[in-house]
Image (spheres, rainbow, N blue to C red):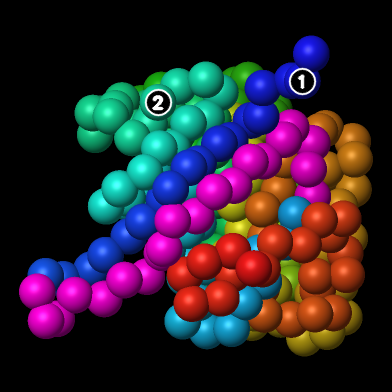
Amino acid sequence: MTAEPLVRVRGLRKVFGEGDAAAVVLRGVDLDLSRGEMATLLGPSGSGKSTLLTILGTLLRPSEGLHHMLGQDLSTASDAERTRFRNKHIGFVFQFHHLLPDLTALENVMMPAATSRGKETASMRSRAAELLDAVGLSDRRDYRPAALSGGQRQRVAVARSLMNEPPLVLADEPTGNLDRHSADQVMALLDQINRDTGTCFLISTHDEHIAKHCRRHIELLDGALV
């Protein structure tokens, strides 16, 4: 018996605008992601990679198609249901780290859990400290983002994405602003987390060098999978 995929989308379409101004960005995408996958989403700028990731992350609704994750139909879920699902089950790493400048590294990592609970707890602080240790920043937990290097800030963002132990992490050009050495360090970190925890990563990039860190390659061209 084949295991149910973690994520399943069928016939996914996204159109922005109407009439003569309509732009079709996704054209009937079918995709399954399994637990524990380390996959990269490849394609040139404008191919629809970011739109697909945004839909998979429930931040944007498709114009047509089915979107299931963990057996739940997210295509028909309410906005409130999608928000709760996203906070609990999906982590994000973006090209820009989006760390809050007035918070320490530890406080930034805690944010997803503190936001959902409405307060900080001792167990959250402990979990955040463990994650910073896992990404090699235990000695930087009290530093604010301005005192960290670009690679260190992105490692804090990786730790933050794992705070709620999501089965899926979506990363949109996570090394786009880093030099090659820092980029390789971040990708090695993601690969190690994937192997250690079974977290599924889908990483969008146009960099073939970065894609070599992933064991599955998914190519998107003009809104369709190649």
x%, y% of residue 64? Answer: 30, 48
Q: Is residue 28 visible?
A: yes
Q: Amino acid at mark 1?
A: Thr
Front one among 181 and 16: 16
Q: Please, is residue 134 above or below residue 121 in the view? A: below
User: Quick one: which residue is furthest to the top in this view?
Assistant: 1
Q: Which residues are magenta?
A: 19-38
Q: Is residue 106 visible?
A: no
Q: Please, is residue 169 above or below residue 69 in the view? A: below
At 41% across and 63% down in the image, what residue appears? 27
x%, y% of residue 86? Answer: 44, 35
Is 115 positioned to the left or the right of 69 in the image?
A: left
The residue beneath circle 2 is 73
Element type at mark 2? strand
Q: Amino acid at mark 2?
A: Asp
Quadrant of residue 115 within the rendered picture: top left
Element type at mark 1? loop
Could you give the CA–CA distance between mark 2 and mark 1, rounded to whole angstroms? 20 Å
Is 27 positioned to the left or the right of 105 in the image?
A: left
Q: Residue 26 lies in magenta, yes or no?
A: yes
User: Neighbour class for label 1 at 10 Å: few (<14), some, many (≥20)?
Assistant: few
- Report how many numbered discs are placed on residues in the image: 2
Give whichever of discs 2 and 1 has the lower sequence position. Answer: 1
Front one among 153 and 83: 83
The residue beneath circle 1 is 2
Quarter of the figure that contains the C terminus: bottom right
Q: Main secondary structure of the magenta part?
A: strand
Is 16 positioned to the left or the right of 100 in the image?
A: left
Front one among 70 and 20: 20
Numbered disc in front, either 2 or 1 = 1
